[in-house]
Image: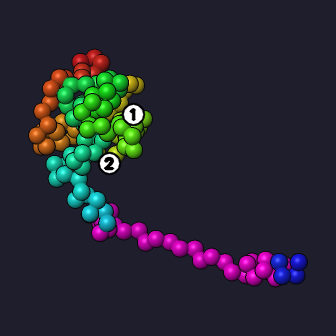
């Protein structure tokens, strides 16, 4: 009991130092961030073979419904939804999380998705043909 009490007292004496990270000026990237940006295609396309690129391609093909997009990607993604790889749930999650990307390539309205201007531009630069995409008119136009 005396050893436990002395151990607790020793633990109370040692405080962890609070570490703070130095903020860097806006626009200044760390070396690791530059490497991550380089992995993405210069045209703004997601990495080759990525689930996000397959989803972008499905949207460029004119699909807008979640189940149609996920089904299309599952058929064309080289067994990507097979054992030991991405699941249908991963595709749905990736579709939904696009809004939190720095430059979203599509937007979501319920179970429907549409390319953003950045998505159309990335597709154009990457040579992905746009088929079936229509500009959506806003109410009152």
Q: Residue at x 84, y 79 (%)?
A: 5
Q: Is residue 66 visible to us here?
A: yes
Q: Residue at x 35, y 24 (%)?
A: 67
Q: CA distance from mark 1 to mark 2?
A: 24 Å
Q: Residue at x 40, y 37 (%)?
A: 87
> Which residue is more in the foreground, 107 or 141?
107
Is the Cβ of the residue at disc 1 closer than 8 Å to that at disc 2?
Answer: no
User: Magenta stretch containing residue 120, yes or no?
Assistant: no
- 120 up-or-down from 42: above or below: above
Compared across the picture, whether 108 is left or right of 117 comes to right
Quarter of the image with the N terminus is bottom right
The percent position of residue 116, horizontal first and vertical second, equals 25, 35
> Which residue is more in the foreground, 82 or 95?
82
Predominant secondary structure in magenta? loop
User: Magenta stretch containing residue 23, yes or no?
Assistant: yes
The percent position of residue 18, horizontal first and vertical second, equals 57, 74
Q: Residue at x 24, y 33 (%)?
A: 76
Q: Is residue 27 visible to us here?
A: no
Q: Point out the stretch of residues depicted in magenta.
A: 5-31
The percent position of residue 105, horizontal first and vertical second, equals 26, 39
| Badge nearest the viewer, 1 or 2 | 1
What is the number of the mark on residue 102? Answer: 2
- 109 up-or-down from 86: above or below: above
- Sequence-wise, the earlier of marks 1 and 2 is 1
Which quadrant would residue 3 be assigned to in this image?
bottom right
Estimate how packed mark 2 is, as few (under 14), some (14 to 19) or many (20 or more) residues with alpha carbons within 10 Å: few
Instruction: Name the residue tied to disc 1.
Output: 88
> Which residue is more in the foreground, 4 or 17?
4
> Dot 2 lies on which element?
loop
């Amino acid at each position: 009991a005396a050893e436990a009490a002395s151990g607790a007292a020793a633990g109370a004496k040692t405080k962890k130092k609070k570490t703070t990270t130095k903020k860097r000026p806006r626009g200044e990237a760390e070396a690791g961030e530059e490497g991550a940006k380089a992995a993405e295609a210069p045209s703004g396309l997601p990495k080759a073979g990525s689930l996000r690129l397959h989803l972008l391609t499905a949207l460029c093909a004119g699909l807008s419904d979640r189940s149609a997009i996920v089904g299309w990607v599952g058929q064309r993604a080289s067994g990507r939804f097979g054992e030991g790889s991405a699941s249908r749930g991963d595709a749905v999650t990736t579709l939904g999380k696009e809004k939190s990307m720095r430059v979203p390539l599509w937007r979501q309205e319920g179970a429907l998705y549409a390319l953003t201007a950045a998505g159309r531009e990335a597709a154009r630069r990457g040579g992905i043909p746009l088929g079936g995409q229509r500009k959506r008119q806003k109410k009152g136009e």
